Amino acid sequence: MDKDLETPLPDVNILAITGQDTTGYTTDNGGRFSASISTTKPTSLSFSHIGYESSTQIITSSEQLTILLIRKPVQVP
């Protein structure tokens, strides 16, 4: 979700990393995704989108998340 506009972000890239295993996901047009993640080991979820700062969350239990991504400032050369 865009932090400033509070609107869903489609096509956010998500990497779920548990130990040596990595699985990729992408949000749908409504900014949603679903993943089956083991809660026996901590899992790192990394969220990235062009034009936004990346965000990482550590998941240790089954829960619903709302991730707010912050826009990167535009840099003109």
Image (tube, helix red, strand yellow):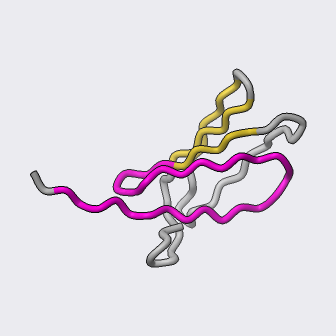
Q: In this view, does 29 lie to the left or right of 23?
A: left
Please determine whether, in this image, residue 2 is positioned above or below residue 41. Answer: below
**Position in image of residue 34 (x %, y %):** 71, 52
Asked if residue 60 lies in the magenta stretch, the reply is: yes
Region of the chain picked out in magenta, as a range: 48-75
The image position of residue 5, as x and y in percent, is 45, 78
In this view, 54 is above or below 42: below
- Point out the image quarter for the N terminus: bottom right
**Furthest-right residue in view?**
40
Which residue sits at x=86%, y=50%?
61
Q: Residue at x 66, y 38 (%)?
A: 16
Q: Is the magenta region chiefly helix, strand or loop?
A: loop
In terms of image quadrants, where is residue 53?
A: bottom left
Task: Look at the image and say whether residue 67 sits in the magenta stretch.
Answer: yes
How far across and how far down the image is residue 36, in percent?
79, 43
In the rendered image, the vertical position of residue 34 relative to residue 8, given as above or below: above
